[in-house]
């Protein structure tokens, strides 16, 4: 249902045209299953930043805060 309308042909259309299988469970992603490039640390810039209460280069922080930006390695 979308916008109060029943769309019986939508799921089959998505499966056929987008190559997605509706109703299959999502596979959980873990930090170990993701590879990213090492952080680029600009020490001069970081030393000039004032009043910065939190700074982390941890892998999971970088993954969680990338906001859709691609930092994933491409094989």
Image (cartoon, rainbow, N blue to C red):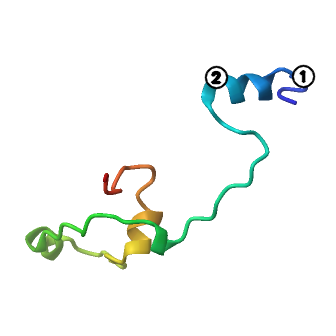
Q: Residue tagged by mark 2?
A: 17
Q: In the rendered image of this protein, does residue 62 appear above or below residue 68?
A: below
Question: Which residue is located at x 14 percent, y 71 percent?
Answer: 48
Question: Which residue is located at x 83 percent, y 20 percent?
Answer: 9
Which percent across, then down, holds residue 51?
29, 75
| Residue situated furthest left in the rendering | 44
Q: Quadrant of residue 50?
A: bottom left
Q: Quadrant of residue 54?
A: bottom left
**Relative depth, front residue between 59 and 10:** 10
Which percent across, then down, holds residue 57?
31, 75
Q: Residue tagged by mark 1?
A: 5
Q: In the rendered image of this protein, does residue 51 appear above or below residue 72?
A: below
Which percent across, then down, holds residue 14?
70, 27
**Relative depth, front residue between 37 and 20:** 20
Label 1: element kind? loop
Which quarter of the rendered picture does the N terminus lie within?
top right
Tag 2 or tag 1, which sits nearer the N-term? 1
Mark 1 → mark 2, Cα distance in angstroms = 21 Å
């Amino acid at each position: 249902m979308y916008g109060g309308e029943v769309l019986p042909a939508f799921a089959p259309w998505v499966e056929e045209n987008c190559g997605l299988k509706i109703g299959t469970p999502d596979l959980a992603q873990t930090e170990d299953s993701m590879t990213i490039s090492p952080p680029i640390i600009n020490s001069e810039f970081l030393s000039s930043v004032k009043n910065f209460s939190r700074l982390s280069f941890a892998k999971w922080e970088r993954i969680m805060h990338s906001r859709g930006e691609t930092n994933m390695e491409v094989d």
